[in-house]
Image (spheres, rainbow, N blue to C red):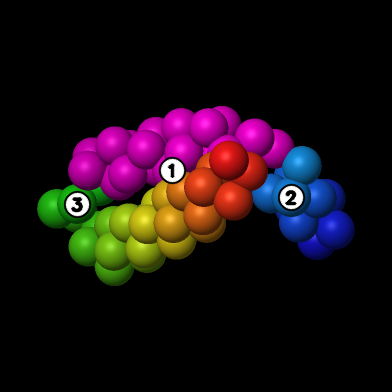
Amino acid sequence: MSKITSFFKDSSPLKLIGISVLIAVLSYFIEKPLPNIFMGLRLIAFLLFVYSTIRLLNKK
């Protein structure tokens, strides 16, 4: 668990934004067969995007 938290704390905000966009794009492929997982991935992507945007704005 500490590896995961250290990854989010140490990685750059642009890298996290890229990961969140990638998760959002990949979630579109499972929209019809697995709607619950689709919504979960979209929620994770949104939270990651907001977190990385806040970190990006705080750096400047």
- Residue located 80% across and 50% down the image: 6
First of labels 3, 1 by sequence position: 1
Q: Which residue is mark 2?
A: 9
Give the distance between the C-alpha atoms of the residues marked 3 and 1, in whole angstroms: 17 Å
Quick one: quadrant of the C terminus?
top right
- Residue located 37% across and 57% down the image: 46
- Percent x, y of residue 25: 29, 37
Tags 2 and 3 in contact by the CB under 8 Å rule?
no
**Within-10-Å neighbours for mark 2: few <14, some 14–19, many 20+:** few
Furthest toward the front, the residue is 60
Tags 3 and 1 in contact by the CB under 8 Å rule?
no
Query: Which of 30/48 is in front?
Result: 48
Task: Give the residue type at disc 2.
Answer: Lys
Task: Give the residue type at disc 1.
Answer: Ser
Give the distance between the C-alpha atoms of the residues marked 2 and 3, in whole angstroms: 30 Å
Of the two numbered discs 2 and 3 in the rendering, the one whose residue sits closer to the viewer: 2
Furthest toward the bottom, the residue is 36
Regarding mark 2 in the picture, which secondary structure is present there? helix
**Within-10-Å neighbours for mark 3: few <14, some 14–19, many 20+:** few
- Percent x, y of residue 11: 70, 37
Query: Which of 7/10 is in front?
Result: 10
State which quadrant residue 24 falls in: top left
Magenta stretch, residue numbers: 11-29
Quick one: quadrant of the N terminus?
bottom right
In this picture, residue 49 sits left or right of residue 27: right
Q: Which residue is mark 3?
A: 31
Q: Which residue is mark 1?
A: 20
Q: Can see residue 24?
A: yes
- Residue located 19% across and 52% down the image: 31
Does 21 appear in magenta? yes
- Residue located 32% across and 56% down the image: 42
